[in-house]
Image (cartoon, rainbow, N blue to C red):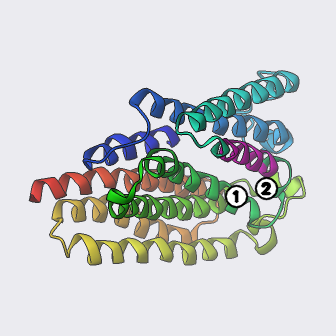
Amino acid sequence: MLAMMQLVFRYGFLNQQNCYLALADWQYLLLVLSTVLIAAAGYVINDIFDQETDSINRPNSQIVGKLITESKAYNIYVALNILGVSIGFYLSNVIEKPSFATIFIFIAACLYFYATTLKKVLLLGNLMVAFVLGLSVLIIGVFDLYPATHKGNQDQMRMLFGILTDYAFFAFLINFIREIVKDAEDFKGDYNQGMQTLPILLGVGRTSKVIFGLLLVPIGIVFWYVNSYLMFNDLYFAVLFLLFLVLSPLLYCLIKSWTAKSTSDFRHLSLLLKWILFFGILSIVVINYNIKLNA
């Protein structure tokens, strides 16, 4: 999903804007690889610290402690981070902004801090994971748009970065809600480990109502965006895409969340939110195509 997001924004959107981008294609693929490697390292360290929880919540899919030893998992974690940060350091020097390498170190540190500490703290862990996903969208602008910005194209670059920011916020919001849904799904294992997640504090029933309330936010944003931008500019193909593949599933999730109680209910919602994020990101390609179709 992470790689797909970054490839869609580059080749389905930015490449179609008739503007100069800082990174060559192979360098951009390195940027994608770097973020994927660091994200993979985050999954590994999370699995290391979640062994007892996963033995309850996901006994059939547990890897660390079953298929591979904890020491081997730590070696994989370190290797993935070194590769990811090294590529980031190289790309930072390519665009002549060596200090930007700290972004990759920061992301790796955030994922480690999440796995070891923040995931046990009410909502902070959810916010951290959602923030890192949003940052993976913004990093495209930092490495591909910002270094190529000059006085002659400032307005265009500001507009493009603004669009990336809108989608980064959408990704943040959907993933934040999904993280709470996953906490409700993992209630039993998390409770046994003494974690302070929202379902443990409020109970699963009340958490489903919180999810209901949070889902109203992206629904309102998508509806406003469709009405204010797409309908106003006669982008009807994009309107239909968002209505059927983003807004309708969001409304379905809203209805289902009100009565969600079981693990299977929350697993269903989690999967739907993942697809909503996928089609939400893909909408940038559809909007771009619709603009060209109307030209």
In this view, the residue farthest toward the front is 151
**Residue at the image position 47 percent from the left and 30 percent from the top:** 27
Count neighbours of disc 1 (C-alpha within 10 A) and say few if under 14, some if 14 to 19, many if 20 or more: many
In the displayed structure image, the side of residue 149 where residue 209 appears, left or right: right
Label 1 sits on a secondary structure element that is helix
Per the model, the C-alpha gap separating discs 1 and 2 is 9 Å
**Residue at the image position 42 percent from the left and 47 percent from the top:** 148
The range drawn in magenta is 101-114
**Residue at the image position 74 percent from the left and 34 percent from the top:** 44
Q: Quadrant of residue 39?
A: top right
230 or 165, nearer to the observer? 165
Q: Is residue 236 above or below residue 280?
A: below
- Type of amino acid under label 2: Lys
- Residue 128 is tagged as 1
Residue 177 % position (x, y): 59, 64
190 or 80, nearer to the observer? 80
Count neighbours of disc 2 (C-alpha within 10 A) and say few if under 14, some if 14 to 19, many if 20 or more: many
- Type of amino acid under label 1: Met
**Residue at the image position 78 percent from the left and 51 percent from the top:** 114
- Residue 167 is tagged as none
Q: Would you name the residue on which mark 2 appears?
A: 119
